[in-house]
Image: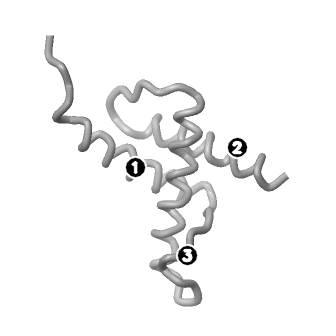
C-alpha cells in the first residue's frame, strides 16, 4: 500500500504545483506524477535542512506540503533550463 500512497501523493503534489505555477506546463498525467515524486524528494532534502536529527543527504519522501514546494522548485528550474530552447515562429 505504500507505493500506491507514494504515487497518489506524487500526483497530487504535481497537480497542485502545476496549478500554482504561472504559465503553461504542457505535460501529461505520467509527467505530472513524476514531477510530484521528484518534488517529494527535493522537498525531503529541504525538510531535512530544518531538522537536527536527520542527515541532510538522506533521501526520504515528505508530506504533501514539502512535496508541492519541491515540485514548484523543480518546475521553476526546468522553466529556466528550457527558456533558451524555445522556437519563435
CA neighbours of label 3 inside 10 A, class few (<14), some (14 to 19), many (20+): few
Task: Please name the residue shown 62% across and 42% down the image.
Answer: 12
N-term-proximal mark, 1 vs 3: 3
Disc 1 is placed on an element classified as helix
Q: In the drawing, does residue 22 fall left or right of residue 46?
A: left
N-term-proximal mark, 2 vs 1: 2
- Please, which colouring scheme is shown? one colour
CA neighbours of label 2 inside 10 A, class few (<14), some (14 to 19), many (20+): some
Front label number (1 vs 3)? 3
Residue under label 2, please give it.
8
Give the CA distance from mark 1 to mark 3.
Answer: 19 Å
Location of the C terminus by quadrant is top left
Residue under label 3, please give it.
58
| Residue 77 position (above or below residue 79) | below
Q: In the drawing, does residue 51 fall left or right of residue 11?
A: left
Residue at the bottom extreme of this rendering: 53
Disc 3 is placed on an element classified as loop
Q: Are marks 3 and 2 in contact (CB under 8 Å)?
A: no
* Residue 29 sits in quarter: top right
Residue under label 1, please give it.
74
N-term-proximal mark, 3 vs 2: 2
How many numbered markers are drawn? 3
Residue at the right extreme of this rendering: 1
| Residue 46 position (above or below residue 81) | below
Amino acid at each position: 500500500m505504500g507505493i500506491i500512497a507514494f504515487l497518489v501523493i506524487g500526483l497530487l503534489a504535481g497537480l497542485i504545483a502545476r496549478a500554482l505555477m504561472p504559465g503553461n506546463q504542457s505535460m501529461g498525467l505520467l509527467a505530472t506524477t513524476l514531477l510530484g515524486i521528484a518534488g517529494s524528494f527535493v522537498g525531503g532534502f529541504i525538510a531535512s535542512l530544518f531538522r537536527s536529527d536527520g542527515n541532510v543527504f538522506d533521501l526520504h519522501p515528505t508530506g504533501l506540503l514539502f512535496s508541492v514546494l519541491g515540485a514548484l522548485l523543480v518546475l521553476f528550474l526546468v522553466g529556466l533550463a528550457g527558456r533558451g530552447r524555445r522556437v519563435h515562429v
